[in-house]
Image (cartoon, rainbow, N blue to C red):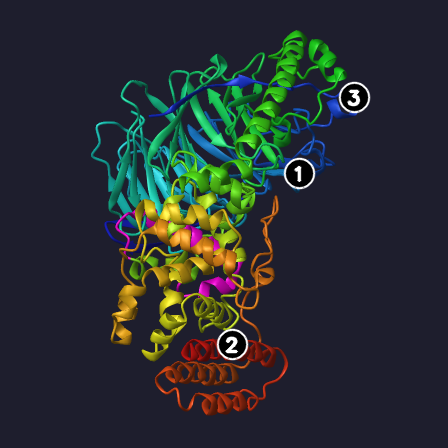
Amino acid sequence: MSKELRSLEVPNLHVHIAVLANINGAFQVDKISSMDASSFVIEKNPEILNMGGKVVLEEAAGVVWPQTLDLCSLQATHKLVTLLEVISQFGITNAALSCHGKFLAVTTPWPQDATTRLYIVHLKENRYYFLNRLVQNCTALVYHPHAENVLFLATEATSVYQIDVVSGNIVVLAGHLHPVTGIVVADQTSLIVTHNHQEVFLWDSQELKLVSKLRIDHQASVVWACDVWQRSELLVCFKNGSLLLWSSVSREQKTSISIPHNIEDQFNAFNISSDGSWVVGCGSGQLMLVYSLVSRTVVRVVQLPQTAANVQQVAFLPHIHPTYQQVLAILNTSGNLTIIDFNTSTKLKNVRSQRFKIESFTFSTDGGLLALTYCSGSTKVYGIQALFPSQNTDSQDVMAAQNPGCLEVEFTIVKDQAEIEGQRERKEEGKHKIEEQNKELKKLLDRNKWYSILQEYGQYPSKYRQMIWVSSLDLPRNYKVFSLLLKKGIHTAFENLDDVVPIADRSLLQTLQGTLSCLAHWAPFLATVEYLPELIFPFVKYFQRNPLLSFEVSVTFLLNWCKLWFEFWPQPGVTILNMVESVLCERDPELLAHLMKLKVQAAEYAWPLLTSAFSKVVSGNDWLVLWDHIFSNVPSFLLCVVVAFTIKSRKSLMSCKEKQEVKVYYNQESWVSVNDVIHKAYTIHKKASTESLPKDILDPWITIPQGGLPVFNIGPQDAREAQREDVEHRLRNLSIETALHKSSSKNTNQSAATKKEELFIFDTRGELKRQEKECMKSIANLRRRHLQDMQL
């Protein structure tokens, strides 16, 4: 066999590329509960019983028997029947399925030449072939999560190989001092993480070079490591259950997560959820720890069933079932494979062999196929759908489960009919109990009740504030939609957010970065809104431990309270600011005239309050109390809060002699009482005229639908920028000149007539003309009120 070798220089190691030619081929403790449909049964149809294929690894190449086997049409079955069996007389040590189930790679020892052979089974073309001979035993085998033909393999010789299973090209990644025990390929980045008990290496799969290496100085050995691409972090899990997190950019250790002091266990298996929020760790006992990478703590301790004790492998299965969004597969040293609903801590199914124990499992990341490797020397392929309970468990299934003659020989029943019936009764009782609890919760969250509490006490109880806000905003908690947006990664507009927003808390910064990215993926226009980070930051900070709620609160706020903000983007919302001035004119015309005299525009006192969600002038608990009232009222109430804050700041504003003093006041924390502002806002909202505060335009509510997101249709209108700027400039000049009338009473009538004529000079077309007339009408009303005040 001919080889062409060349080396690539990288720091402290060599990467060899070999092209092989002529190759033939404080926490909550849960207890796992059980549910029905937990047994595997088989169809009685003889055609179904005999539909599986078979491969015997004896030659350098061969075909799958029968050649007419079609795994694609069989993998959707809800019965755990063997679709394909791969047999080696010397046993199979490792197996891996490619991302879409096209290839199955297996390694088998070969005593004749004391080597290990790597075989590839082509599941689409029903053939197999010998790919390579390994001098050392295989210690890790995994496919790339997206590249179907890229296989990663590690041996006891401390090397890692990247193999193209089609062309046979091999890249050797050398540098470890000890044999590699795990390989994890990042889902959305180019990083490859390889690790053993003392080392963690990061490789770039595109440039084929070592990016970084961590020599772990820790009292416990490394069990597992991965790149948490959603949070730009490197996660390392240890035998004693502790976790360490590094920045995958700067490689600086950020934080550690320790287990509760009263838990003593040796942990053998870890895995991470697809959204990068949860990590599970299992050990030699019956306990499973659930870590939150958001709160950096152990949030749950789950007691596994006895059949799942002494775990050796754990993994989150792909999301393919409409009911079960996060499902764990747990394999213990006794060969029992337990399927658990992660969200409810419920055991869905239990799989074990009557004769041979299960050594390991692997699955295609698209959720199509599952491969189980047995100690008997065979690997069997199944449809992964069979691991989930069927929608309805009928009596025929139960009867078949009681008859061993109807079962496939590899599996046994773990639940008898009496237990299943008992589970059904308990399930009905639990369903009834949940319905009663939901009714009580609806009564508790009845708007009339908690709104009365708000009016009486002035704020919501801090313990229930989040729950009340979520109920008030009618958030659906669309986890699946949020996960899909999160998987798109960090939006390019927010990659360097830490340079723009100086936040010391890295976890909070990453939550903000993730929320902004999801918003930009949902509505690309939002990526261009420069004040968006400042606007949603207070909400993200409050909901930091729940990124999903941070996102949905931000979406609801933008759609309902900001619906007229972007009409004249990138300029401030003229319509909104004109409403603020109109309401202020009704309530305190003298104050408005003073601001106009100082040439202070609404864009310089109202806009900073709106675009910062009042976080510049109000902080801490006062901010929460303020938003208790804003979220509990219609969107038009927000503008009344802006006006109320300005009126309550009257003494400070009237003492200002320059425009800059007003701008400084609106960009620093204020001494004004929040309760006084809220009380004034209610009065203003009640008495505001329809002409100055068109509630029919502001108050229609947009709700996030279940299972989706509304269309973002409140972006800027299609108007020429030059026309818009010109009209705004002339309108502003009119407002300023109107304010000056107060100092010249003799020429008031003549000036008013002149300005009235100017209102008819502007000639714009279409939608822009209509908006201009509305603005001018408001300003004319403003001027008329000033004249009336002067006459008084």
Q: Earlier in the sequence, mark 2 or mark 3?
A: 3
Find the residue positioned furthest to the top: 418
Type of amino acid at the residue the image marks with label 1 = Asn
Answer with mark 3 or mark 1, whichever residue precedes in sequence.
3
Q: Are marks 2 and 3 in contact (CB under 8 Å)?
A: no
Label 3 or label 1, whichever lies nearer to me, is 3
**Quick check: 605 above or below 791?**
above
Q: Residue at x 51, y 80 (%)?
A: 780
Residue 655 in the image: x percent, y percent?
A: 25, 70
- Left or right position of 215 against 398: left
Between 63 and 141, the one lying in front of the other is 141
Q: Which mark is residue 781?
A: 2
Q: Nearer the viewer, mark 2 or mark 3?
A: 2
- Which residue carries the number 1 mark? 126
Q: Could you give the CA–CA distance between mark 2 and mark 3, rounded to whole angstroms?
A: 86 Å
Specify whether residue 524 is painted magenta.
yes
Considering only vertical position in the picture, is 67 above or below 609? above
Question: Going from the N terminus, do you reach mark 2 or mark 1 first?
Answer: 1
From the image, state whether disc 2 or disc 1 is nearer to you: 2
Q: CA distance from mark 3 to mark 1?
A: 22 Å
| Depth order, front residue of 565/122 | 565
Whole-percent x, y for residue 395 in the image: 75, 15
Residue 146 image offset from top left, x and y in percent: 52, 47
Residue 46, disc: 3
Q: Which segment did they paint magenta?
A: 502-531
> Is residue 739 in sight in this rendering?
yes
Q: Residues within 10 Å of mark 2 (few under 14, many from 20)?
A: some
